[in-house]
Amino acid sequence: GIGQALCEELAKAGAGGVYVVDIARESAQKVAASLPSLATNNYHQLNNYFRCGFGVADVGNEDDVKRVIHDAWILFGRIDIFFSNAGIMSMGGVDDVSNEQWEQIWNVNVMSHLFAARHLFPLWRLKKQSGSFTSNLEN
């Protein structure tokens, strides 16, 4: 999907590393494993510089979001670009979807972006680092 394509383009464009997050371990691991071969920048090839990691998270859960941001920060020592791309939907009309399903949809599609900003922005301020935070919230 969009997240995988973005990771691939970042690797091709010369990013120093990419941290992939998915709710499914196999998906995150597969995407992460495919990225080093795409890092075609000469600097990466000469210096074996490209690093990649992955995390498993339900982004509708704030503790999971906090953990993967922390893990990525520990791996790379910084986060320059953060792209929040998770989104889910449920089939059926408003009267067919349970309150639990609506809560899950809300948490993943809306709250996950707040959770990410809440835990990433303080790191940027602490390290006096600027970064780019992009979300698909408008979609």
Image (spheres, rainbow, N blue to C red):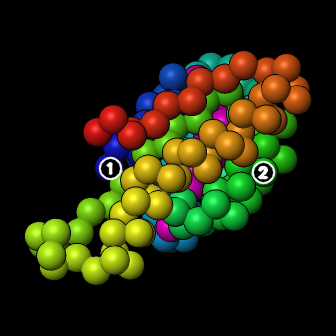
46 above or below 23? above
Helix, strand or loop at mark 1? loop
Q: Position of residue 80 (x, y in %)?
A: 68, 27
**Residue displayed at 50% across by 53% down:** 111
Helix, strand or loop at mark 2: helix
Which quarter of the figure has residue 139? top left
Q: Residues within 10 Å of mark 1 (few under 14, many from 20)?
A: few
**Would you place residue 98 above or below residue 117 in this image?**
below
State the residue position of label 2.
70
- Farthest-out residue, left: 93
- Can I make out residue 48 in this image? no
- Amino acid type, callout 2: His
Which is nearer the N-term, disc 1 or disc 2?
A: 1
Determine whether, in the image, residue 92 is placed left or right of residue 48.
Answer: left
Magenta residues, dominant SS class: strand
Going by the numbered disc 1, the residue's amino acid type is Gly
Percent x, y of residue 84: 49, 43
Image: 24 above or below 9: below
Residue at figure coordinates x 59%, y 65% from the top left? 61
* Nearer to us: label 1 or label 2: 2
Q: Residues within 10 Å of mark 2 (few under 14, many from 20)?
A: some
Q: Is residue 16 magenta?
A: yes
The residue depicted at 78 percent of the width and 51 percent of the height is 70
Look at the image and give the residue range highlighted in magenta.
Answer: 14-23
Please indicate, yes or no, whether residue 24 appears anywhere in the rendered image: yes
Q: Residue at x 44, y 50 (%)?
A: 110
- Estimate the x, y position of residue 62 in percent, counting from the top left: 64, 60
Question: Where in the figure is residue 82, as x and y percent of width and height?
Answer: 59, 35
> Magenta includes 134?
no
- Place residue 43 in its image quadrant: top right
Quick check: 104 left or right of 47?
left
